[in-house]
Image (spheres, helix red, strand yellow):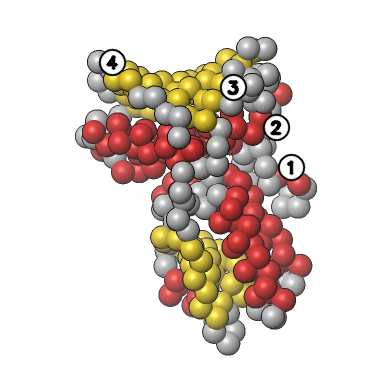
């Protein structure tokens, strides 16, 4: 079953935004993790993951998001999420992700948190 | 895609092979049925997430020889019931890892995985798991709320 997905990156001077599109499963999660790791290695410690175009996430995808949180935490960085649906936010809070990453309604507020 | 759909009054049957992303087929059918019953958008999303996790649970853990998952969608006036069945080795639901909300350490490996059943319990109104040496059936019910009408 074809799952079309994509990741768009907008790297600014102080932060970068990774915008996912499609079902966030292990495949998209691994791609996202690799791109986040590339940004971290370039020195970015403030990342936003925009999930507005990702309608569905599975628990494997979420586990990979946790790995990104951990990778940033090692650099004393910050990961903010935005564009979550109600169920996504509820799931993130249940899994305690909200304790270690920011959750914001949109990209603007997620980026503003870095200021 | 080896999928068989059978409509029978208030029941829909779907068989999906344990292949990548086939859980989306099960979730999309659940969404279609729930939407036709006027469940709210949020409830439909909750159903999709629970269905995805139920299928993934079977894919990852059942070790089913036929590599299929059988799904019943049972339509009632005010609720939808889903029965997700595999013919695998079974497991003990009582032995699943239990976490307290928000109180776990960030780093232990176990924390990243094993959330599927907890997500299902959190998102559905009623969940029952029957598991034995001939396989596992997860039954889950979503009741239609007034807001969803």
Q: CA distance from mark 1 to mark 4?
A: 42 Å
Residue A2 vs residue B132, the one in the foreground: A2
| Image mark for residue A68 | none
**In the structure shown, which secondary structural element does the residue marked by tag 2 occupy?**
loop
Looking at the image, which residue is at 46% across and 51% down? A3
Tell me which label, 1 or 3, sits earlier in the chain: 3
Image position, residue A1 (x, y; %): 46, 44
Q: What residue is shown at x 31% (from left), y 43% (from top)?
A: B41
Q: Depth-wise, is mark 3 or mark 4 nearer the camera?
A: 3
| Circles 1 and 3 on the same subunit | yes
Mark 2, residue position? B97
Q: CA distance from mark 2 to mark 1?
A: 9 Å
Q: Which residue is mark 4?
A: B8
Q: Are marks 2 and 1 in contact (CB under 8 Å)?
A: yes
Task: Measure the C-alpha gap from mark 4 to mark 2.
Answer: 38 Å
Q: CA distance from mark 3 to mark 2?
A: 27 Å
Height in image: B85 above or below A76?
A: above
**Side (left or right) of B97 relative to B2:** right
Q: Chain of mark 2?
A: B
Label 4 marks which chain's residue? B
Q: Residue B110 bears which disc, if any?
A: 1
Left/right of residue B34 with respect to residue A108 in the rendered view: left
Residue B66's disc number = 3
Q: Do the residues bearing badges 1 and 3 touch, measured as CB atoms within 8 Å?
A: no
**Dot in front, 3 or 2:** 3
Number of disc labels: 4
Q: Chain of mark 3?
A: B
Q: Residues within 10 Å of mark 2 (few under 14, many from 20)?
A: few
Q: SS at mark 4?
A: strand
**Circles 3 and 4 on the same chain:** yes
Q: Where A114 sits versus B19, above or below? A: below
Mark 1 falls on what kind of element? helix
């Amino acid at each position: 079953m074809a799952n079309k997905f994509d990741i768009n990156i907008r790297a600014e001077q102080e932060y970068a935004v990774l915008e996912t599109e499609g079902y966030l499963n292990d495949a998209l999660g691994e791609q996202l993790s690799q791109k986040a790791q590339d940004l971290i290695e370039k020195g970015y410690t403030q990342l936003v993951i925009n999930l507005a175009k990702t309608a569905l996430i599975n628990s494997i995808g979420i586990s990979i998001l946790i790995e990104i949180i951990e990778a940033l935490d090692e650099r004393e960085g910050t990961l903010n999420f935005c564009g979550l649906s109600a169920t996504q936010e509820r799931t993130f809070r249940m899994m305690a992700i909200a304790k270690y990453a920011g959750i914001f309604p949109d990209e603007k507020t997620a980026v503003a948190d870095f200021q | 895609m080896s999928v068989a759909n059978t409509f029978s009054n208030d029941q829909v049957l779907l068989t999906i092979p344990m292949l990548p992303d086939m859980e989306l087929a099960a979730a999309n059918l659940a969404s279609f049925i729930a939407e036709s019953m006027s469940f709210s958008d949020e409830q439909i999303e909750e159903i999709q997430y629970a269905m995805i996790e139920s299928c993934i649970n079977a894919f990852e853990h059942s070790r089913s020889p036929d590599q299929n998952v059988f799904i019943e969608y049972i339509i009632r006036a005010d609720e939808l019931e889903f029965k997700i069945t595999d013919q695998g080795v079974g497991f003990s639901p009582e032995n699943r890892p239990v976490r307290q909300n928000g109180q776990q350490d960030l780093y232990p490996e176990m924390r990243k995985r094993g959330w599927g059943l907890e997500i299902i319990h959190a998102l559905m109104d009623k969940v029952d798991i029957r598991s034995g040496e001939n396989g596992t059936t997860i039954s889950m019910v979503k009741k239609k709320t007034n807001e969803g009408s």
